[in-house]
Image (tube, helix red, strand yellow):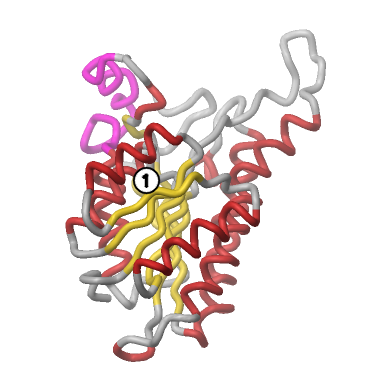
């Protein structure tokens, strides 16, 4: 797909993966609608990008909110790309130190933020992309979801998070099969340990040393720009479809994480 003049909706566009992807797609010629619950961060990314970019406050768990963001995206032109890159909390151990069970509501909240919200965006974005005229070979666009390597080898305390991310992995092929007749692809990125704003003011070198021990190569955390590179390749390569791609430097989590 030629990204020049295409429109991309990036959910979580004010955060690490989302902001980096918004920048990269915009640099490739796409118009970008940044959707985020954080007004300050979301507006900052849209203002940084300038012409061909806009921000809409978006609650990914709310149907009306997501639809409003997609409507704004379609005002920029034909929607071709939807990237689901929002974040959230990962949950708790199923039993605490006193063997008390975690609240069921805590599990449901993680599932809602990650899995249910991803499906919510996917279904609405697919309907929006389906309204765009087909390009060469009948392609209309692509949906890019974000899972995690926790979907395959989740660590201690990641029961809810791993379940949510595994659900996203499980949706990928059926999504591609559902949407294939409309010329819409679906691909999922499963990142490993990445240096994102979630780590706030932590020293990057110290984090690379701590987390990079278990990464075969390169022995460091991933960078949001590397996620964005893959997202661009997925958008541009019409034969990438129905697959989950691990982006982790070969890392496999152990019971206590990657370190």
Q: Is residue 86 left or right of residue 53?
A: right
| Quadrant (top left, top right, bottom left, bottom right) of the C terminus | top left
Q: Is residue 115 above or below residue 175?
A: above
Q: Residue at x 50, y 82 (%)?
A: 180
Outermost residue toward the bottom? Answer: 137
User: Residue 106: x percent and y percent?
Assistant: 73, 30
User: Residue 17: x percent and y percent?
Assistant: 35, 43
Q: Residue at x 34, y 31 (%)?
A: 196
Q: Is residue 226 left or right of residue 156?
A: left
Q: Is residue 250 above or below residue 74?
A: above
At mark 1, the secondary structure is: helix
Q: Is residue 18 left or right of residue 65?
A: left
Q: Which range of residues does the magenta coloring cover? A: 203-223
Q: Is residue 218 magenta?
A: yes
User: Residue 56: x percent and y percent?
Assistant: 45, 49
Seen from the viewer's position, the closer of residues 61 and 87 is 61
- Numbered-mark total: 1
- Which quarter of the figure has residue 225? top left
Q: Is residue 63 left or right of residue 155?
A: right
| Quadrant (top left, top right, bottom left, bottom right) of the N terminus | bottom left
Seen from the viewer's position, the closer of residues 184 and 166 is 184
Q: Is residue 28 magenta?
A: no
Q: Residue at x 33, y 91 (%)?
A: 137
Outermost residue toward the top? Answer: 98
Q: Residue at x 51, y 74 (%)?
A: 176
Please rate how many residues cluster around mark 1, counting C-alpha atoms within 10 Å: few if below 14, some from 14 to 19, many from 20.
Answer: many
Q: Is residue 51 above or below residue 257?
A: below
Circle 1 residue:
18
- Which quarter of the figure has residue 244? bottom left
User: Residue 123: x percent and y percent?
Assistant: 60, 66
């Amino acid at each position: 797909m030629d990204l020049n003049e295409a429109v991309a909706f990036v959910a979580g566009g004010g955060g690490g993966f989302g902001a980096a992807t918004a920048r990269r797609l915009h640099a490739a010629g796409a118009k970008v609608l940044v959707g985020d619950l954080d007004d300050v961060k979301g507006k900052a990314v849209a203002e940084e990008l300038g012409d061909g970019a806009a921000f809409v406050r978006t609650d990914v768990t709310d149907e009306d909110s997501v639809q409003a963001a997609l409507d704004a995206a379609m005002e920029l032109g034909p929607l071709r790309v939807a990237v689901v890159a929002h974040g959230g909390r990962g949950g708790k151990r199923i039993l605490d130190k006193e063997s008390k069970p975690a609240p069921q509501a805590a599990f449901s909240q993680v599932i809602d933020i990650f899995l249910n919200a991803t499906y919510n965006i996917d279904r609405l974005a697919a309907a929006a992309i389906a309204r765009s005229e087909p390009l060469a070979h009948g392609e209309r666009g692509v949906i890019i979801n974000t899972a995690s390597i926790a979907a395959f080898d989740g660590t201690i305390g990641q029961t809810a998070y791993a379940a949510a991310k595994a659900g996203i992995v499980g949706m990928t092929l059926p999504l591609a099969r559902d949407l294939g007749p409309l010329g819409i692809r679906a691909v999922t990125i499963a990142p490993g340990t990445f240096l994102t704003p979630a780590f706030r003011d932590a020293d990057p070198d110290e984090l690379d040393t701590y987390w990079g021990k278990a990464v075969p190569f390169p022995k460091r955390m991933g960078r949001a720009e590397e996620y964005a590179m893959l997202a661009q390749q997925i958008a541009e390569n019409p034969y990438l479809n129905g697959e989950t791609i691990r982006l982790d430097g070969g890392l496999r989590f152990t019971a206590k994480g990657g370190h």
